[in-house]
Amino acid sequence: MIDLLTSPEAWAALLTLTALEIVLGIDNVIFLSVIVSRIPPRQAKRARQIGLALALVFRILLLSLLVWLIGLTQAVFTVNGIGFSWRDIILIGGGAFLIAKATHEIHGEVEAREGGGDSAQPKSSAFFWIIVQIIIIDLVFSLDSIITAIGMAQDLEVMIAAVIIACAVMYVSSGPVARFVAEHPTTKMLALAFLVLIGVALVADGFKFHIPRGYIYFAIAFSLAVEVFNILARRNRQRVP
């Protein structure tokens, strides 16, 4: 442990891996912000806390199961010469879930507006099902994140430290992001479109067609910048007497 603290290579790996884990955590934050927007603020805050705590637990648990996790990348069956591992199956299933969930939410938003803007009150079981969905997506994102971490660092301590720092950043940023999404309906629709895009990327990864995440994050950043300008323009128009 002392050797790691005095090793420039370990610190470089920690900084690089932490930055990567924070970027990969954007998907988690977007999903959490969208999915908790339909429940009361107090429950939404608790759901975010539970979701991010589970994200941290899942990542550390998966890191402690390195041998088993590496085994998930071994092909279990082959179709037309393409081998599929358990990781591929999980990514395809998780991506399909994201696409279906985001499409359902988009449909709900459109129907609510067409019906006069009166959204249905959340059922008593809504909080439970939101936590279930958060667990499913946390598992998918955690698996993808940790397999990336294993490929970038050799020391378990470095990987755990990077994951903890990234989850702390996710926790700090999730509240403002969730409030922003809840206050701006057009931003929520944009976030749902991002989830469809992320789901497609996960499914593509499962089928061995890798879409560089840089393209996806650039599209997200560009769209968010345009939306911010739209929000500022609307505010300025409202101030004009």
Image: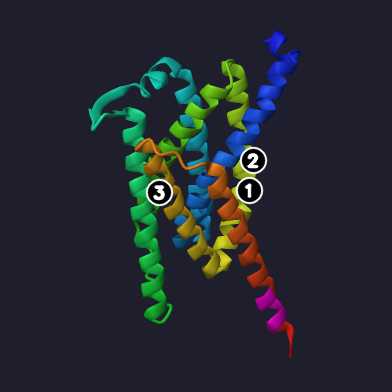
Q: Amino acid at mark 3?
A: Val
For image coordinates 66% across by 25% down, the residue present is 14
**Do labels 1 and 2 touch, CB within 8 Å?**
yes
Of the two numbered discs 3 and 1 on the same chain, state the one appearing first in sequence: 1
Q: Is residue 143 above or below residue 98?
A: above
The quarter of the image holding the N terminus is top right
Q: Amino acid at mark 2?
A: Val
**Residue 172 image-quadrant placement:** top right
Residue 81: % across, % down:
26, 29
For image coordinates 58% across by 35% down, the residue present is 21
For image coordinates 23% across by 32% down, the residue present is 79
Q: Is residue 43 above or below residue 134?
A: below
Residue bearing the label numbered 2? 169
Residue 107: % across, % down:
36, 67
> Which of the colour schemes (rainbow, by chain, secondary structure, one colour) is used?
rainbow
Marker count (numbered): 3
Residue bearing the label numbered 1? 173
Which dot marks residue 200? 3
Q: Is residue 17 above or below residue 25?
A: above
Q: CA distance from mark 3 to mark 2?
A: 26 Å
Magenta stretch? 233-237
Q: In front: 109, or 200?
A: 200
